[in-house]
Amino acid sequence: KAGVTQTPRYLIKTRGQQVTLSCSPISGHRSVSWYQQTPGQGLQFLFEYFSETQRNKGNFPGRFSGRQFSNSRSEMNVSTLELGDSALYLCASSLSLGRIIPSYNEQFFGPGTRLTVL
Amino acid sequence: ILNVEQSPQSLHVQEGDSTNFTCSFPSSNFYALHWYRWETAKSPEALFVMTLNGDEKKKGRISATLNTKEGYSYLYIKGSQPEDSATYLCGGGSRLTFGEGTQLTVNP
């Protein structure tokens, strides 16, 4: 069974630009969550999508948005990039099994996208 | 936002040593506690998802315990091997907030 894939793996952008990251979950997984990791911080929860709907959201500004398609693939978009957005962005998929609290579900992580904002 | 704290931040042990790390979290509004192993250049991989107070789980040489009433979990590694070198993350809360991790280095 193929794992979670993320594209691109590395990305360099400049301040003010926008970026779109893509995540393909494990086949059969309907929940996709996004996390940000910056130096000195733990993994911070951005949002979770389930059946094309945002089901949970972390405490990030509106510049961070996402969506999920009918095949469960998900994209995350960051507009008006700031230097502080430089980070590793991980997505994770889970079976969910109807449990709406992400914390109940084992997460299967992708390799991440390393975003550098200059 | 759930405040998950892990200690120590980093740990160096010799091959064959047994070791343990701590994960602390607020005991109120507990949902589940996750442990993940994150090796360099790889994706975080789930070790345990624990939900019940007093839970003890084991996978090979690695085991974990959970105390939801006092808000802590311990991860134990028996007879550490160089391949156990990784960052160990714990996370919890409704939105799965993670601590900063414990970076373990096992010297041969």
Image (cartoon, helix red, strand yellow):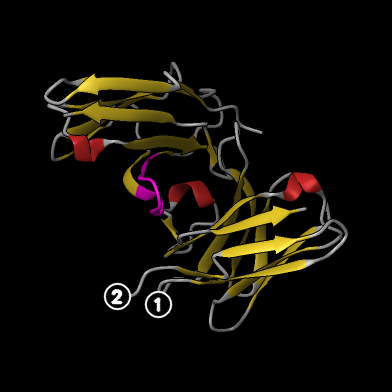
Q: Quadrant of the C terminus of chain B?
A: top left
Q: Chain of mark 2?
A: A
Q: In the picture shown, does residue B51 fall above or below A63?
A: above
Residue B82 in the figure: left or right of residue B25: left
Stretch of the chain drawn in magenta: B35-45
Q: Is residue B83 above or below residue B3?
A: below
Q: Position of residue B40 (x, y in %)?
A: 38, 46
Crowd band around label 2 with a 10 angstrom C-alpha radius: few (<14), some (14–19), many (20+)? few
- Residues packed near mark 1 inside 10 Å, few (<14), some (14 to 19) or many (20 plus): some
Q: Which residue position is annotated with label 2?
A: A1
Q: Name the amino acid type tagged 2.
A: Lys
Q: Are marks 2 and 1 in contact (CB under 8 Å)?
A: yes
Residue A112: percent from left, percent from top: 52, 59
Residue A108: image quadrant is bottom left
Q: Secondary structure at mark 1?
A: loop
Name which quarter of the figure residue B107 lies in. top left
For the point 30% across and 29% down, which residue is it?
A: B105
Q: Nearer the viewer, residue A22 or B3?
A: A22
The residue at the point 22 percent across, 32 percent down is: B63
